[in-house]
Structure formats: structure tokens, C-alpha cells
Amino acid sequence: METWDDWLFGGILTLRTARRASLVDQVIDQLKDEIASGAWAVGAKIPPEPALSETLGVGRNTIREAVKALTHAGLLECRQGDGTYVRATSEMSGAVRRRLRTAELIEILEVRRALEVEAARLAATYRDDEDIATIEAACVHRDAAMATSDLTTFVEADMAFHTAIVAATHNRVLIELWHDFTETVRATIASAGANTANNAAIPHTPIADAIRRGDAEAAALASHACMEEIFRIVKAAPR
């Protein structure tokens, strides 16, 4: 059970004391910064209202209004009797999440294919030595995770591989779009089968190899082949 002192002095908060002008807007901006920076990850519980009030040097009503605004924007979620949790990293992410709740899996996979094919193409063009090392290590880790037959472990390893490719594009807009889409991508990875055996047939090494060689066209084709296999598995799965 966290105490106020834990939040205030335990290194959990990195907030600054707010100035007196436009306090609600300032607090909104600072809370957004904590979320965007990853200090408060998606799914994490934010500090309680009294702790935020004391840290920022503003009244609890100001905190309450800021939290209400971010809840309305889809970044936070207030759970009665439990606290407030981070739901999304930006207004765009919140809007994407709301839209995806009613989207069909095939529609989501079509968008994922568009993002990943272009990401592979750009990664092969703009990757550096560090990117190559990260992608290849993630590919090895993915294969090792698949061998464990632990679906949760595999999903995270597979997610890390695709995220490494997106990071290698060095395209800030694409990286932000991917970040907003990650929770849904996790769900599509898991939906490829009830166990990791179904994922064994999905080719990933050719993507990493093409990116390493700097062959943009081959990387895009390998990524497209990967997604086509995912489509095949999902469509063949019993409803």
C-alpha cells in the first residue's frame, strides 16, 4: 500500500511545482508529460489526489479538474474505490483505442499490415548498426520465447521484435502511431493462435535479414509475407 511519502520522497514523482497562472492547464500539461515520457506507463496507477496536490503546490480542486479533463480525453481512467489509471499515452491514442473497441479483427490486421510493411521498408533504408543489433537480438529472443510454449512470453517477445523495426525507421510520426497501436497489436499477435505452435510458421528472420542488408524492397516483401500468414491463421481459426 503506497503512502504519500512513498510518492513524494521515494523517487516516483518527477513533477515540478506549478506556477499560479492557468493552474488547471499547467497541471494537465504536467500530467501529460508524465504519461508521454513513460514515467506513468499505460495500465499504471497514478499518485493519489492529495499527493499530487502537495507535490504541485495546488489545490485538490485543481487536481480534480485536470484529472477529469484527461479522463474525458481518454488518457486516464478513474476506477471507483480503487484510484486513477493511465489508459492511453495521448489524445490520439485514446481515440484509437475507442475506435478499435468496435473494429473487426481483420480490419485491425489490415491497418497493422500497412504500418508494418512500410516500417520494414523504412527500417532497411535508415537503420544504423545499433538498430540492426537490436532487431537481430529481438528475433533470437522471439524464437527462444516461441520454444517455451508460453503464449504471454511469446507475445511480448514478438511485440519487441516489431517495435524494434519501427524504431529503426527513425520516423517520429510512424513511431508515435505504432505506440498508439501497440495494445491492439498485442491482441492480434495472440489471436494468431491459442498457442505458440501456430506462430512457428510465420516467417520473421527474412525481415531481419533484409533490414540488415539494407534491402528495402526485400524487407517490405518479407513483412508482407509475414502478415499474409497471420491473415491465413486468423481466418482459419474457429469462430
Image (cartoon, rainbow, N blue to C red):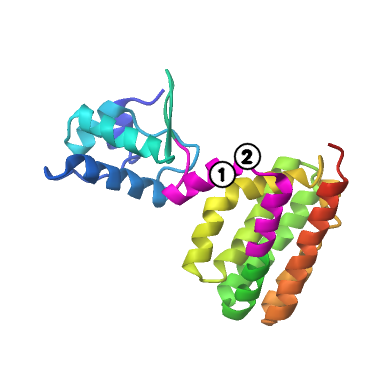
Q: Is residue 154 visible?
A: no
Q: Residue at x 60, y 39 (%)?
A: 101
Quarter of the figure with residue 81: top left
Q: How far across and how far down the image is residue 231, in percent? A: 80, 54
From what the image shows, is residue 124 above or below residue 198? below
In magenta segment, residue 102: yes
User: What residue is pinned by disc 1?
Assistant: 99
Q: Is residue 130 left or right of residue 24?
A: right
Residue type indicated by callout 2: Thr
Which quadrant of the view contains residue 69? top left
Callout 1 touching callout 2 (CB < 8 Å): yes
**Residue 39: where, in percent of width, then height?**
40, 46
Q: Which mark is residue 37?
A: none
Q: Which residues are magenta?
A: 86-115
Question: Which residue is depicted at the point 71% across and 74% down?
Answer: 219
Secondary structure of the residue carrying numbered label 1: helix
